[in-house]
Amino acid sequence: MLQLVMDEDDRPRLKGDTASLLAKEDLSPYSQDELNERIALLQAEIERVKAHRDKAAAHRNAAEALFGKSTA
């Protein structure tokens, strides 16, 4: 019997990711200090995502330079 195994990257993404849930959260209970901490954490996360995006783009560009641009 053939068993298919999916890598995590191959799995469908869940609708309503964490960022979407954060955007819906009521912010009124938070103090000014808590909001400032939240902003700092979100800015750090944005930088982390940008760094990952740039790394993935560099990897893709290197692959395209080596193997030619894909038509997919």
Image: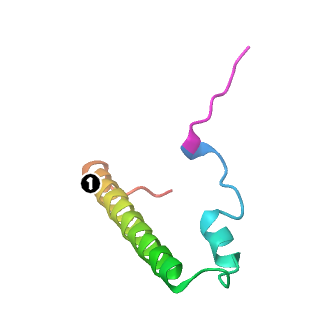
SS type, badge 1? helix
Percent x, y for residue 3?
A: 69, 21
Q: Amino acid at mark 1?
A: Ala
Q: Nearer the viewer, residue 47 or 34?
A: 34
58 versus 27 height, above or below:
above
- Quadrant in the picture for residue 20: bottom right
- Quadrant in the picture for residue 7: top right
Q: Residue at x 46, y 81 (%)?
A: 36
The residue identified by callout 1 is 62
User: Badge 1: few (under 14), some or many (20 or more) residues near its Cα, within 10 Å?
Assistant: few
Q: Left or right of 32: which side holds 13?
A: right
Residue 39 falls within the magenta-colored stretch: no
Percent x, y for residue 14?
A: 69, 56
Q: Nearer the viewer, residue 25 or 68?
A: 25
Q: Left or right of 38: which side holds 60?
A: left
How many numbered marks have been drawn onto this rendered protein structure?
A: 1
Q: Nearer the viewer, residue 18 or 34?
A: 34
Q: Residue at x 70, y 80 (%)?
A: 26
How is this picture coloured?
Answer: rainbow
Q: Left or right of 65: which side holds 15?
A: right
Q: Nearer the viewer, residue 15 or 66?
A: 15
Q: Residue at x 46, y 58 (%)?
A: 71
Q: Main secondary structure of the magenta part?
A: loop
Percent x, y for residue 6?
A: 62, 35
Extreme-top residue of the structure: 1
Residue 3 falls within the magenta-colored stretch: yes
59 versus 19 height, above or below:
above
Q: Residue at x 32, y 58 (%)?
A: 55
Q: Quadrant of the N terminus?
A: top right
Percent x, y for residue 61?
A: 30, 59
- Quadrant in the picture for residue 56: bottom left
In the image, which residues are magenta? 1-8
